[in-house]
Amino acid sequence: MRVFIPLVAVLVAGLAACSAPSAPPSSPSATARAFQWSHWGGSAGGDRYAPIEQITKTNVAGLEPAWTFHTGALAKGWNVSGKLTFEATPLFVDGTLYFDTATGQVFALDAATGKARWHYDAHVDPKGWYSELTSRGVSYWRDPQATAGSPCAARIFVPTIDARLIALDAATGKPCADFGDHGQIRLATHLRGTHRFDYELTSPPVVADGTVITGISIGDNGTAAEALGVVRAFGARSGVPRWHWDPIVRTDASHPNRKPYSKWNGAANAWGVFSVDVQRHLVFIPTGSASPDLYGGDRPGDDHWANSLVALDTRTGKRVWSRQLIHHDTWDYDLAAQPMLITLHRHGKAIPAVVQLTKNGQAFVFDRTDGTPLFPITEKPVPTDGVPGEHLSPTQPYSSLPALIRQGPVKPSDAWGLTFWSRNACRDKIRHLRSDGMFTPQTLRGSIEMPSYAGGSNWGAGAWNPATQTLFANVNDLPMEVQLLPRAEYNRQLKAGGAPGWEYAPQDKTPYGMRRRALTGPTGAPCIKPPWGRLVALDLAHGRIAWSKPLGNSRGQAPWPFWFLKGVPNMGGPLATRSGLLFIGASTDGYLRAYDQKTGKVLWRYHLSAPAMATPMTYVAGQRQYVVVAAGGHGKLGTGSGDAIVAFALPQ
């Protein structure tokens, strides 16, 4: 029997496409023609919403490829080529698309034809042992003080996996020599604890008040003494440091004997994309877990401000407000999703709000001026009897909004499999593991982490329709098996080569190493019934789930006759348009789909050359609306890889 791709079991069989004849596309409105996708999330607030409606629910069935561009960036000969992922969302400004690849290639394309206008090579070392081989895009900034047409009057800021921040002239692709050291800043200097290839820029920075602000990606579970997850800001013209902010509070009156923590523990880094409230001079930062991810005995307390939504003043870096959404994280539940800045209409008022989606499938909504919760948050008791030396929090925050995924314990009766034998094997696995629900402590015998550290919501975040007050998000719903190993046992297993199928990590400077793997049966399918991936519509006007649909199917990923399974693992994000359409790739089955925002019905789909583990975007060029997505696959999910940017449009 052919086995599943690890973590995958996948998609629904056939889809009957709408066969009604399509009306000729209408001319785009002035608003649509003026719309620029000038930020990674569409707007500075990351709403992934486009006020464009040439492509509608009645004509989307006619959508077809308009052009395809191949980057050639397939990482051949790279030491970590198996990790290659193409997660970029292009920017659209004044008729040009801008994007990058994990290998440090940067492109500017004619948005109407897909022809290259310029190309820049950052010369990233292919022999590095990088923790991640991905990049999610670039940032654009127009210098308000520059003369139009002068060099670097508009700049593209490029993050690289070797931790450089590069400034390029948006018109030519040449480095801006006045920025940093001849156009670049090297961030990986004077690191402690972290191997230099574990210290990366994988997400684009944001630019506000003439300042370019960036987080950092730090490899997980290496040591308690990981590099500090400092957020840094530089002058957008000069590259001169402006301010920095360390998410970890180094002193705490409630824990006066905190020397090991202040000396060793680091990370809590913000590796996802930030959002900016330009009017209020606020940058919203989602932080990750403190190091190491799965054991916190040397970091007593709640680890402020790890696992938090933090609002900083863009001009000074001072903390304006913050809300911690996971206390004392030992599950790798980073806040990965970009905060979404929205206007929420409640009780006759228009409230400036921020939504934070989480890996454990929750949605938290705050007044973005001061952090007041707009939907109540309750601290609920959770288990605290972890491994010796651990200091788990007795409570965790729960949003009053409905959860986007399953959150209860995994019981032997929940075991699922493609066959009777697979189901029995899963039942035996579950019976021997601890499972108390979402915040199950890590143990020496092994625990079920449900959901896994992949989410819930991950870096792709969601999309927002301001007219309907609806948020759309893709989520994963998968269990993980995690085990802490006493140091001697960890060393013994590693010396023997490790058990097949497990990911091992040392967690140096702690009593425990760790190992983890997907909770799957003999065929590679997850041990709980599908769907393992969903697309969810959350109605924030009424605080309810409007609809929840399986995302993707198993055809081509599961053995026949198991092609009927609905809801597969996914990574990426959605795009909402004014016409009531929702576009998303993300699923491991390789389709780009268009959904009806109102009902969740699939109206169109197209099978790509490689799965689109990225977020689509849209724009109007030459009176024609395009929907564009990166089709590059995901190395860690075991999908096929690719190098294509594909643009779709209605027939001319």
Image: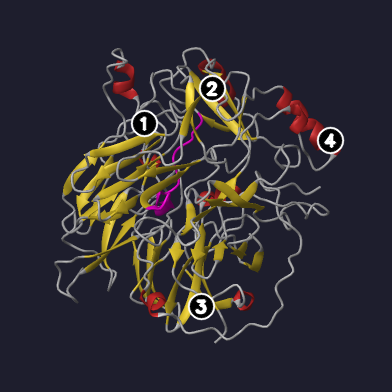
SS at mark 3 in the image: loop
Q: Residue at x 26, y 21 (%)?
A: 251
Please state which of the two labelled residues, at mark 3 or mark 4, is closer to the viewer.
3
Measure the C-alpha gap from mark 3 to mark 1. 49 Å
Which is nearer the eye, 628 or 41?
Answer: 41
Residue 450: percent from left, percent from top: 60, 33
**Amino acid of disc 4:** Trp
Going from N to C along the chain, the mark reached first, 2 or 3, is 3
For disc 2, the marked residue is 382
Which is nearer the eye, 88 or 74?
Answer: 88
Going from N to C along the chain, the mark reached first, 3 or 1, is 3
**Residue contact between numbered discs 3 and 1, judged by CB atoms under 8 Å:** no
Please state which of the two labelled residues, at mark 3 or mark 1, is closer to the viewer.
3
Q: Is residue 170 above or below residue 179?
A: below
Q: Give the magenta range.
A: 331-349
Residue 399: percent from left, percent from top: 50, 36
**Amino acid of disc 2:** Val
SS at mark 1 in the image: loop
Q: Is residue 305 magenta?
A: no
Residue 99: percent from left, percent from top: 40, 64
For disc 3, the marked residue is 54
Q: Residue 46 vs residue 178: left or right?
A: right
Going from N to C along the chain, the mark reached first, 3 or 4, is 3
Please rate how many residues cluster around mark 4, counting C-alpha atoms within 10 Å: few if below 14, some from 14 to 19, many from 20: some
How is the protein colored in the picture?
A: secondary structure
Q: Residue at x 39, y 18 (%)?
A: 298
Q: Residue at x 42, y 80 (%)?
A: 29
Q: Residue at x 44, y 70 (%)?
A: 51
